[in-house]
Image: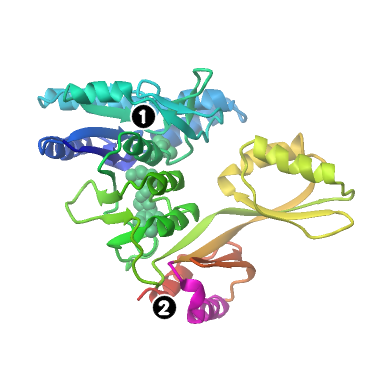
Amino acid sequence: MDTIVMKFGGSSVADNIRLNIVAEKIIELYNKENNVVVVVSAQGKTTDNLIKEAGELSSRPSDREMDMLLSSGEQITIAKLSILLNRLGYKAISLTGWQAGILTNNTNQDAIIENINTDRINKELNDRKIVVVAGFQGINENTDITTLGRGGSDTTAVAIAAALKAKHCYIFSDVDGVYTTDPNKVTVAKKLESLSYKEMLDISSEGAKVLHNRCVEIAERYNIPIITKSTFNNKPGTVIDDRIEGSTVKSIVKNDDITFISAKCEKYTLELFDKIYRTLLENGIQVKNLINNSTYSLDLSFYIKSSMFNKFAYLLETDLSMLDCTYYNVTRISIIGHGIMNNNNILTDTLDIINNNKCEILSIDINEMKIAIILKNVIPNSVLEQLHSKLIK
Ligand code: ADP
Ligand code: ASP
Ligand code: MG
């Protein structure tokens, strides 16, 4: 008997009608003699709403309490789905992250799964139960609840699939696969039949929401094929595995969730540099491309996720009050595919389009599989459309 993991995201479980569609999909695979573990997200916009409500109570809610709050969303979905499956005549059991044996490190709000003790899941599977696990959450060594970062239910699903040596992991969502660019930004985007783990990792890490980047890392490490499909139709999805096919542009990601920061301070010491870097890391603010532009004073420039800006602004009033900062939103365009560095036309065509649209370039980053360009200000989707029509064959 094969073991299969099926993950359903927030839009797939948003209401009772959709939960019924999800239940049908689960039952279909269960009836084909599979062991089925289901991982679900919070319903619809629940997580966003909980964050908003906490923000109305405090401008600086503690990370631990936020995890306690946010993990409640997934707990509602597992119970509702199990109640429905039971009513339909199937043995189902809901498990929170800790009941499912998911142990994480201590980084609240962005925890990493360190181990999964599969005893409980296996026991329930041996009883032929459908096991419904809350995504996005685990427990740390102090028995505190942790969450895995926004979109982290994908990672729960693939980590469980790896721990159970599952045949593959299905990720169901509102799109029927991974596209050549975000289909909600460019309507002519095309669905891809397959992608390598490496291509998918770049697509996710560059900010395409479709898969959480850590889930792709785990899938690659344990060689678990991921199949992304739509909950709402039966079209074939996109398979992500270790096969490398073609050397062309596979996908373009436009990420507008980035803030460029320029931070200055009269006095430059190594200790100060160290303090800034550590303070950002300790507060969960990941910094990209940190450059000191001067040898005599501190003149740093770097990028952070715009969604982290409130945390950063608080640090500017407290621990980092010595810094004089300016900042603005930017766009990062990433063009991804195996071997694209060897094709100069891709870079020249890209630069032509950027110049024709009078977008100002802040930096260009090129490696074997990716050209990433940061553009001053947030640029419209029409530029993405032009790049897509020129570069995707
Ligand atoms: P879920 O809530 O099911 O986890 P997400 O909203 O996290 O789903 O991810 C699906 C969304 O990812 C789509 O609605 C789409 O807008 C976005 N997306 C971004 N880039 C891509 C891409 N290249 N292919 C498919 N979807 C993408
Ligand atoms: N509910 C969480 C979020 O909205 C986790 C997830 O959806 O994967 O980020
Ligand atoms: Mg998601």
Q: Is residue 235 left or right of residue 261?
A: left
| The label number, if any, that marks residue 83 in the structure image | none
Q: Residue at x 36, y 33 (%)?
A: 42
The magenta stretch spans which residues? 337-357
Vertical comparison of 16 with 349: above or below? above
Within the displayed image, which quadrant is ligand 3 positioned in? Answer: top left
Q: Residue at x 15, y 23 (%)?
A: 91
Q: Main secondary structure of the magenta part?
A: helix
Please indicate, yes or no, whether residue 93 appears anywhere in the rendered image. Answer: no
Q: Residue 111: where, in percent of width, then height? A: 51, 33
State the residue lying farthest toward the top: 143
Specify whether tag 1 is near ligand 2 (CB below 8 Å). Answer: yes
Q: Quadrant of residue 377?
A: bottom right
Residue designated by label 1:
74
Q: Is residue 52 magenta?
A: no
Amino acid at circle 1: Glu
Q: Say if mark 1 contacts mark 2, CB within 8 Å.
A: no
Q: Compare residues 261 and 101 and report the one nearer the observer.
A: 101
Q: Residue at x 20, y 56 (%)?
A: 236
Element assignment for label 2: helix
Q: Quadrant of residue 361?
A: bottom right
Residue designated by label 2:
390
